[in-house]
Image (spheres, coloured by chain):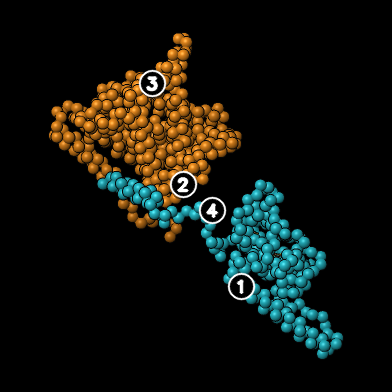
Chain colours: A cyan, B orange
Amino acid sequence: MLGEGILKGLAETARNFLGSYVSKDRLTTVQFPEERLPHIEAARSFPFLVYDGEDWQQGMRCVSCLICEKECPPKCIFIEKSKDKKPDAIGKPQFYPVAFNIDVSVCMSCQICVEVCPFDAIKMDIEFELSTNDRFGGLLWNKERLAKPNTYYGEIHPTEAAAVDAQLAEERAKLEAKAKLAAEAKAATVAAPPAQPLRETSEPTEGSGA
Amino acid sequence: MPEMVDQIFVICKHWLLGFAPAGVQPIFSALLSVVPVLVVFPLLFAITTVLERKGLGRIQNRYGPNRVGPCGFFQPIADAIKSLAKEDVVPDTADRVAHFLAPLLLVAAAFLAYAVLPIGRNMVVANLNAGVLFFFAVGSMVELAVFMAGWASRSKYSLLGAMRAIAQMISYEVPLVLASVVVIMAAGSLSTVAIVNAQASYTGIWPHWFVFTPWGFAGFVLFMIAATAESNRSPFDLPEGESEIIAGYYIEYSGFKFALFFLGEYLGMFATSGMAITLFLGGWAAPFSFLTWIPSYVWFFAKLLTLIAGFIWIRGTLPRLRMDQLMNFAWKFMLPMTLLNIFTAGVWHFTPAGYARWLVCVALVVAPFLLLSRGLQQEKKYGMRSYRFAE
Ligand code: SF4
Ligand code: SF4
């Protein structure tokens, strides 16, 4: 009969209406500023730059290879490469970014920069309360604003960070072993050739640095 | 004493009127009647918006607004400040004059309708002897305002929304008027005051409201359906259709003009609800004879709020109709039902009182309802869709 479904629907909504006053389980709304959900590991907002150790400038992992700058779809990363070198995460001398800016008003949180970075230097943050009253300067983040310690990375994405840390440790060990070998070889033959490039992955770095 | 409380506003008006010199008394009297209406109903609008948002929230198992003020009840103030502070954007190609006038006309038309609503005993702005007619005449001015808005904006969505609005409003105006004809027949008058007076008597404790007769009940339901369609509310909100034509005819409005459209729509809804109360629910009359000591205007607003709650409930329940369903419903169901209802009312009028009359009239309402709803439900059975080229 016409109207039967309407009555059924009205009964359902009335049940919801009254039920929401009686049982708290029905109300799934989280009253945000006061209540917060624990963060989800897979969450992401905007990228940040990882650094090891205490000093954010010394420990910055980014080697200024410019891959992320080129890959970023909306072109919101700006990097200026250094002239000199400093040791990177695994201890090899590398270039570093003199300037590293991300315009977060343009960034679309696609995580492509993270996927392409061969040095695990850029990762996704989970911070989302980012409002500012300066919509130009306040949303153009420089190197200092972007730099966050590796411990923070371990906090927000524990599984991912553990894998990255393990891999970096392995590479560091390999490098040390090689250095030791080279030193021994040097000791054996006094006139040894200078050290060769150690990693395949470091090739594009040298290439793009030209 | 109850008499005194009941008439307090009327007495106040006469007392205030005494201060005015004789020459300006008619104007002053009109002002004293009009200003309360201009204050009370927009206030009711403000309260309704927050109640509606809270009610809809609860229906969807949410809290609804609960931030501004105690329990979120100052939300309308925040909304008003926001809409006042917003930039008023007028499209470049818009017809500026019509674009500007449309919201004003809508609100003015909505307010005019209150002139004939008896809010309490002796409380009516203008007791016209063709009050019901005036009400519907003014009500159709809303259509003009809506089409002005849609046309003047020069936007496809506005125009689509306006066309839908016109098609819908004109289609539903017919059953709206026809549904109220039964009451005019029974009361024998077009004056709203006379209609309420006809219902304000009691048998035992039971009132003589028209809704408690078969034709009155059917008329009330039909009137409310048509009123929902007239005020563009869900499930008849096709002209606005947020999810398809964004906001329909008022998409190109911003800031306070947008708020005016909202105000106009809600005022229209209150006015048609008020008319439904006047016609079928006994106006300001109390529902039981032993409750007559409660002031009449309290009853009117209690009934109004109940109907508004009903509107909100319906809005939270039903999805939007399709255009063809809307039109089928108007012309294949509402129109024949209202016409037959007039016949039923005639039968009721000319048969002697008793159980036989009830039986005949209930049958006269139920049988066409069943038949017509069967007709509505007969839908074409569509087979699997076949594609000519995309296989
Ligand atoms: S997340 Fe995407 S858009 Fe944002 S900086 Fe990285 S690559 Fe660019
Ligand atoms: S890809 Fe990684 S290492 Fe290369 S510039 Fe970007 S953040 Fe730095």
Q: Position of residue B105 (x, y in %)?
A: 48, 27
Tell me, for residue A85, which label it has, or none. Answer: none
Q: Position of residue B10 (x, y in %)?
A: 38, 21
Q: Are marks 4 and 1 on the same chain?
A: yes
Q: Which residue is mark 2?
A: B64
> Badge 4 local density, few (<14 within 10 Å), some, or many (20+)?
few
Q: Between marks 4 and 1, how big is the CA–CA gap?
A: 32 Å
Q: Amino acid at mark 4?
A: Glu
Q: Amino acid at mark 3?
A: Val
Q: Position of residue B115 (x, y in %)?
A: 40, 23
User: In the rendered view, does B179 fall on the left or right side of A180?
Assistant: left
Q: Residue at x 64, y 61 (%)?
A: A47
Q: Secondary structure at mark 3?
A: helix
> Badge 3 local density, few (<14 within 10 Å), some, or many (20+)?
some
Q: Which residue is mark 3?
A: B10
| Chain under numbered label 1 | A
Q: Secondary structure at mark 4?
A: loop
Q: Amino acid at mark 2?
A: Gly
Q: Is the CB of mark 4 within 8 Å of ligand 1?
A: no
Q: Secondary structure at mark 2?
A: loop
Q: Secondary structure at mark 1?
A: helix
